[in-house]
Amino acid sequence: MTLAQLIFLAAAAVTLVAAIMVVTSPRLIHAGLWLILSLAGIAVLFILLDNGFLAVVQVAIYIDAIAILIIIAVMLTRAVMSDADRQINRMGLAAAFASLILLAGLLAMVLQVPAASPAPLVEAEVNLDALGRALVDVDGFILPFEVASVMLVAALVGAILVAMAPARGD
Amino acid sequence: MSDPFVTIGQFIKELLIGLGLEAALTAVLLRIVGAAVLGGLVGAAAILTIWAERKLLARIQDRIGPNRVGPYGLLQSFADVLKLITKEFLIPRGADRYVFIMAPLVVVAGVIGMWAVMPLAPGLVGTEINVGVLYVIAIGAIGTLGIMMAGLSSNNKYALLGAFRTVAQMLSYTVPMLLTLLIPVMLAGSMGMSTIVEAQSSAWFILLAPLAAIIFFISSLAELGRTPFDLQEAESEIVAGFHIEYSGMGFGMFMMAEFVHAFTISALFSVIFLGGWQGPGVEAFPLLGLFYFILKTALIYFVVIWLRGTFPRLRIDQMNAFNWKFITPLALVVFMVTAILDKLVVQADFNRTAVHLGSNAIIVLGTLFLLRAYAASQRRRKEVADRPQIQHSEAAGD
């Protein structure tokens, strides 16, 4: 038990520190790498909750796909080799306001959750099958699922359109 | 128990408990020891595979290969490792120091991490998780991250170019690789590696899904960055790509990661498509499974080396076109056909192998037909483009 708690504390500390470094490190590329560490910490938390599936999905989607995509975007758009310029520009106040609103919204949402009565976590594994079925069930989440896939296809087509060479003269 | 590894584990466990350790702590310690032994063995296997690869490549290229250090040059790799360890690990000026140092570690960790779920023999597996296949993909892509870190932190344009190429290649070839990995998952009805191996007791999946096996092999070669897909370190264009600035053991770790990765991909292929440890007599002697597993892995590894010695390097547009215009659509078709047929077979009680083999054959014929039509249309277009000159020369000939 104590070992699990120790691992939890370490993982939580790493996640939080990395998350702070994401917003404070002066180089964008370092921010991207810290973000990856932070997401990896969350994957460890999933493992501690006995949900290997979510942990693996966290690594596969957030680290392998999204974070690497962010780093590619940074690599393509900025002079990554030099130290970046000032971290705060004149939109700083607006950004602070927006993030405060987001924090308030999130807090309001989290506080609505009834105070934790520790649920048996092992059942999460069993529910995986139910999750898969719910995604394609008419009574379940088939509409959001299908809308998401249509959106992805639209994004794909849009990306191809943007990247397509202009039509040739002949 | 006829399994010596379980016996050893039991022995150490009883020893530790006898020394007065808690049972829970002992279990954790045993896990750590097991992980260290497995990782160390896999890493050490690289020393052997490097020798084998150099020797085989030399024979393919009509050379002799290493033959001075030890019998048949067997100790050559040890000499190389010693040399690399004693050399200085240089950090170039302007490099991103910590990222630069961490990059080779991340690459090696990503490769060795894959072995955690590899079923070596019946009951002999690092850890059995129910999403093993997904885990392998996720951990494998960590290596991409390491290569990108190396390219970014080196403060070198060639390294950055190599990293760009690597990312383009690895991200795009992950798509067909994932699609084809889903086929054995469907056939076995599970993502756990051990379950996939056990599901192949009657027929190996390469019989049920030969096309998927080929596509998986090609895309894992691309993930590996081996010839014909070694654009990321193309010596003639970008010198050595992402690891150009690395020296000493930093370079050594990249090399080791590459060789271990090649071996790992072979092991993965043999687990997923060749039945892993399945073979005659495994029920009686579980250790025989380890032998079958290594035999199959070595066979696939030989093919990897063979391809490396045979094919020239692709151009980057060829590589991308081959992926997006050919094997990704093909993988999608194979995936959908297999999904539908497998459901129908379960309901209609046909011979599963025959149905899947037949569908694969039809897909191959259709693909060849389409390719032929495409080639013919290209030829016609070229003729149209060349026509004025041809007419001119004919007129001159008359």
Image (cartoon, rainbow, N blue to C red):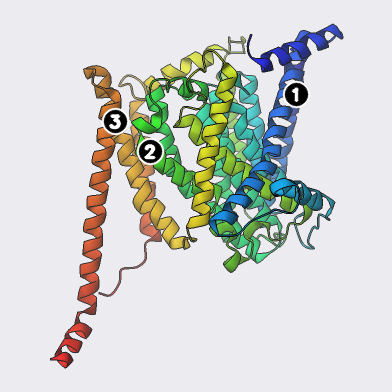
Q: Position of residue B20 (x, y in %)?
A: 86, 8
Mark 3–mark 2 Cα distance, whole angstroms, equals 11 Å
Residue with the most extreme left position: B398
Name the residue carrying label 1. B33
Q: Is residue B188 left or right of residue B45?
A: left
The picture places residue B158, in percent across and down from the top left corner, at 63, 64
- Which amino acid does the dot numbered 2 rest on? Ala
Gap in angstroms between the C-alphas marked 1 and 2: 36 Å
Q: Which residue is mark 3?
A: B356
**Of the residues under marks 3 and 2, which one precedes in the sequence?**
2
Q: Confirm whether circles 3 and 2 share one chain.
A: yes
The residue pinned by badge 2 equals B212
**Badge 3 density bin: few <14, some 14–19, many ≥20, Cα 10 Å:** many
Going from N to C along the chain, the mark reached first, 1 or 2, is 1
Task: Say above or below: A166 vs A115.
Answer: below
Placement of B134 over or under B244, stated as above or below: above
Image point (64%, 43%), residue name: B49
- Residue B92: x and y, percent? 78, 61
How far apart are the two marked residues, 1 and 3, measured between alpha carbons?
A: 43 Å
First in sequence, mark 1 or 3: give its number.
1
Q: Is residue B350 visible?
A: yes
Label 2 packing within 10 angstroms: few (<14), some (14-19), many (20+)? many
Given the image, on which type of amino acid does mark 1 rest? Answer: Val
